[in-house]
Image (tube, grey):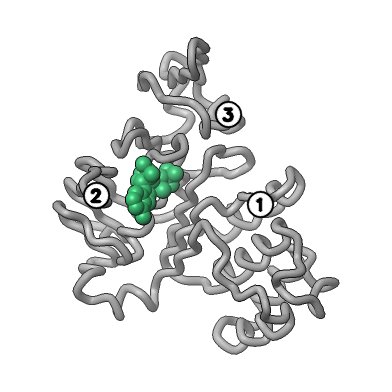
Amino acid sequence: MKNSLILLEKVFARYDKIIVLKNIDLEVFNGLIVVVGPNGSGKSTLFKIIAGLLKPIAGRVRVLNFDPFVEIDKVSKNIFYLPEKDVIPYNAYVDDVIDSLREIHDPGLVDQYIDLFELSKHMSKKVGELSQGFRRRLHLVEALSSNRKIILLDEPFRGLDTSSRTLASEAINYASRRDNCILVSSHIISRLDPNRVVVLEDGTIKYNGRIEDLKPEGCIILERGDEQIKVCGDELRNTDLSNYRIKTVIC
Ligand code: ADP
């Protein structure tokens, strides 16, 4: 039987007294998985648990068959976690950042992503002088060229305009393979071509499956105030979930 790369069983997490993930069961084998859901639904918390940064209060977590809270060294060398907020120091020069990436990752792959994300003309700038979109592109170069078995991208499209988002989606599609898994959290699926979509709301998984399997009768009903919209199958790609509540998921 094939081993899962990530396994969560009956996982609960909380900050202070508030439970933010409830009874999460999730098994990930390979390919591209998009975790979508409104703001505050628990996407970042889920990624922090997989990265071994936040210990759940209950449940079982296995990453590459290891407990990330016990055998962190075995997990950390195989996982790359890109948090929602920028982590590359603003006072560093882009070319120094790239040089250090070339030393630790496959330099050919680093250069390939620099070309793809059109970063060459910004090499002499400081990271803090880049626009938000280009800073995100630089972080994506680091994440994707790491070539790790598990790559977690928390809101990789934040601050990207439509054309950069398309570029980033294509790069992520290209980087996901049969022997790795990439998890992307986002309000919107857009141009990503995921093997699986996980819909989170209020800390619970409302749907876990293929987009195609949500149609024609399977739909997500979203509400915002008095407004209700029905999103079926592929329409989920272009619906920004950030400001909606998920009322029902009919699979
Ligand atoms: P998402 O990534 O889907 O926006 P998060 O995982 O960031 O959701 O947040 C889930 C819930 O946990 C939200 O209600 C958020 O306000 C809360 N939360 C997140 N981080 C913290 C924290 N460090 N301390 C207290 N509450 C937090």
Whichever of labels 2 and 1 marks the residue nearer the N terminus, that label is: 2
**The residue tagged with tag 1: helix, strand or loop?**
helix
| Residue 221 quadrant | top left
Residue 119 location (% of width, % of height): 77, 69
Secondary structure beneath label 3: loop
Q: Is residue 192 left or right of residue 118?
A: left
Numbered circle sitting on residue 10: none
Residue nearest the observer in this picture, 49 or 103: 49
Expressed as whole percent of the image width and height from the top left, the position of residue 112 reads 71, 71
- State the SS at label 2: strand
Quarter of the figure that contains the N terminus: bottom left
Label 3 belongs to which residue?
239
For the C terminus, the image quarter is top left
Taking the image as shown, residue 210 lies to the left or right of residue 25, namely: right
| Furthest residue toward right | 121
How many numbered badges does the structure rendering display? 3
Mark 2–mark 1 Cα distance, whole angstroms, equals 35 Å
Q: Residue at x 66, y 81 (%)?
A: 97
